[in-house]
Amino acid sequence: MRSTDHRPVRQRLLPAILTAAGVTALAVGLLQYGVSAQPGPGGAGSPSAGFDGGDPGSSPGLPTLPPIAGSINPSGGSPSAGRVATRIVIDSLGIDLPVIEQPTAGYPPCNVAMYFDIRQLGQPGQGRSIYIYAHAREGMFLPILTASMRNNGAAMLGKTVTVYTSDDQEFLYSIRQVIRHVPSDDHFLDRPLASKGETLWLQTSEGSSGDKPKLQLVADPFLVAPADHAAANPTPHPVDCGQ
């Protein structure tokens, strides 16, 4: 009987991809303190510092690959009605979190990541910007903040982010830009809202209060494949962590 490999596509394909690309994973330590992300409505001011990995000469990004059986264009096709992001994984940073919709009121919860659900933004496969954020605390997006403090986060360029969706798909994105010190004002969503085509934006905060600058990562899609239902739909357990 032929065996079937049910591992997520990133586990089946990425070792070979990364070897071919000559990309070496860099371990990042976790800080012993926690800080919080507190996004608000509105839209990304111009950061005072950032690392732009858009230039192919400055990033160890993934190579261009021929079509893989079972893959489709992440920005094309007709997404399932009601598709939403349900889980985010960044293996290289040890991040694995359920994703829920941003609460309509109160302080953003811990132990989950959240997505903005406003008209101008979208979900994976819709060809628009997807915006997902979480607190910079242990077990959440703290590794992103930690890595950003080293050479402006250059080690994160080319790393893969996997976003699972409610209709049992996994969308793979490659990080191409790290934007530090985004002012925490009504313009922090300006860049995502102005982006053309499908782009994944990740956000956490650079301090423990709501007025601290934000940190954003920008990633581009390169693969989508079917996912196991249980893997794509973890049960979230949000915790009220206050300010």
Image (cartoon, rainbow, N blue to C red):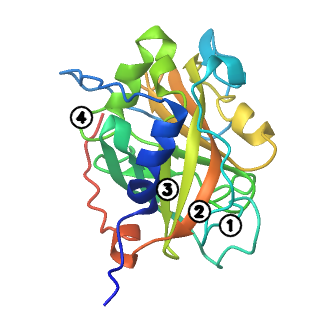
The amino acid at mark 2 is Val
Binning the other alpha carbons within 10 Å of mark 1 as few (below 14), some (14 to 19) or many (20 upward) gives some
Q: Nearer the viewer, mark 3 or mark 4?
A: 3
**Spatial CA span between label 3 and label 4:** 20 Å
Q: Which image quarter is the N terminus in? A: bottom left
Q: Which mark is residue 163?
A: 3
* Of 124 and 100, the residue lying toward us: 124
Note whether 151 is above or below 239 in the view shown. Answer: above
Q: Nearer the viewer, mark 3 or mark 2?
A: 2
Note whether 157 is above or below 170 in the view shown. Answer: above
Note whether 197 is above or below 48 in the view shown. Answer: below
Residue where numbered disc 4 is placed = 138
Are dots 2 and 1 in contact, CB under 8 Å?
Answer: yes
Residue where numbered disc 1 is placed = 72
> Callout 3: helix, strand or loop?
strand
Binning the other alpha carbons within 10 Å of mark 2 as few (below 14), some (14 to 19) or many (20 upward) gives many
Q: Position of residue 38 (x, y in %)?
A: 45, 34
> Callout 1: helix, strand or loop?
loop
The amino acid at mark 1 is Ile
Q: Nearer the viewer, mark 2 or mark 4?
A: 2
> Callout 2: helix, strand or loop?
strand
Q: Which quadrant of the figure has residue 49? A: top right
The amino acid at mark 4 is Glu
Q: Which mark is residue 224?
A: 2
Q: Which image quarter is the C terminus in? A: top left
Q: Nearer the viewer, mark 3 or mark 1?
A: 1
